[in-house]
Image (cartoon, rainbow, N blue to C red):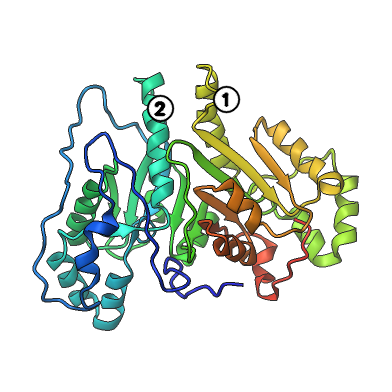
Amino acid sequence: MVKMNLDPVQVMSGQVKELNVSPSSNGDSRGSWEEKQEFDMQDHLGLSTKPKSVAGRRARKVEGGVFFPKPENAVTIAVSSRVLFRTDREQKVFEQKGVEEYLRYQIEHENEPFAPGPAFPFVKALEAVNARLRDLYPQSEELFDIVLVTYNHAHVGIRLINTINHHNLFIERFCMTGGSSPIGYLKAWHTNLYLSADADKVREALAEGIAAATMFMPEKLTEVSETQLRVAFDGDAVLFSDESERIFKAHGLDKFFEHERENEDTLLDHGPLKGFLEALGKLQKKFYAKGHRLDCPIRTFLVTARSAASSGIRALKTLRAWGLEIDEALFLAGAPKGPMLEKIRPHIYFDDQMFHVEGAAEMGTIAAHVPYGIAQKHNAKRNTSGGK
């Protein structure tokens, strides 16, 4: 099993793999890695480099019906700058030389764009869905709204804006907290999902009822779709509560199966990411209403270690009672999830157990840890024979 680095967004092998950035309608079609080659050869902590100009900056025009939805109407995705972009070098400056040198370094390099991080393909897919929604519903505010969240001082905002323009991302909402917790702001934004490299802040968000997960970068990257958003979820302690997981941890697999059979007509309680699946389903139905069920640009997956016959029926009945559709459901009966996720190629996979996150990462899937439920007390045991 892959060993996770202390910094969740560091590449597990220490090597950065290339991300292919698709051309956009705004004109810049070059991948960022190619343009950063000279910068990447510099000393990690060299502070004497003169700023370069940002290549391929797009001219942004907010006109012709392009507008920003009200937060209460949109599906708001808050993304930390440390998972949207690669900031390993800057983090080393901060850790080794302190905040003042860190700020000076950022200002001196503010025209050099950050490379894409683990959340980058996910955000690009969100924007692809928005483009389709705007074609079908030009005046609708039911869109993905992306908020960039960072603990950075506002001085660093210039480099972040330059990077966003360089990569042709449409992100206009920023939250730069200068070291303060962003959780209060997330609530004000009506956040539907928060992705971060800071596990403590993710737990804080979950405690406040905000769907959240800690993102990790795999040592290799699987190519993902540029036209369809693909999101995969674990079941227990992610979409559902950890009720059944608690039975398994306390009494074993046989008792778990018995409990599920006896309660197959009793709905599972909701888990921390149920609301995000609901939000995805709401947008999917807008495509269905226009006759685009078969080519919908959003596709969802349930990938669970539950067995279909012995414990899967309760999960499916719960989803149906909630009025939620999952496009594909994989009941693996304890088999490893990594190979299945390699075939699915999701932009993001959510799981509450680190060994599943690590297994996904081994196969090139960008996975996110949901630190919720009883499994957090058992993660160190790495018991892969679970029934969830």
User: Is residue 153 visible to us here?
Assistant: yes
- Residue 51 spot, x, y in % from top left: 10, 64
Image quarter of residue 128: top left
> Along the horizontal axis of the image, is 145 left or right of 355?
left
Residue 85 versus residue 295: which sits nearer the camera? 295
Amino acid marked by disc 2: Arg
Closer to the camera in the image, 128 or 207: 128
Q: In this view, does 180 lie above or below 144?
A: below
- Locate residue 301, reporting x and y percent: 62, 42
Q: Is residue 240 among the parts visible in the rendering?
A: no
- Which residue is drawn at the image coordinates 35% and 20% (left, top)? 138
Residue drawn at x 26%, y 34% is 25
| Residue 66 against residue 35 in the figure, above or below | above
Residue 386 at what x, y percent from top left?
Answer: 77, 62
What residue do we see at 15% from left, 51% from top?
A: 55
Residue occupying the far bottom of the picture = 96
Q: Is mark 2 on a helix, strand or loop?
A: helix
- Residue 338 is left or right of residue 165, and the answer is right
Asked whether the residues under the numbered discs 1 and 2 touch, taking CB atoms below 8 Å apart as contact, a structural biologist would say: no
Q: Name the residue under label 1.
A: 294
Which residue is under mark 2? 132
Whichever of callouts 1 and 2 sits on the residue coming sooner in the sequence is: 2
| Quadrant containing the N terminus in the rendered view | bottom right
Would residue 280 be found to the left or right of residue 158 on screen?
A: right
Residue type pointed to by label 1? Leu
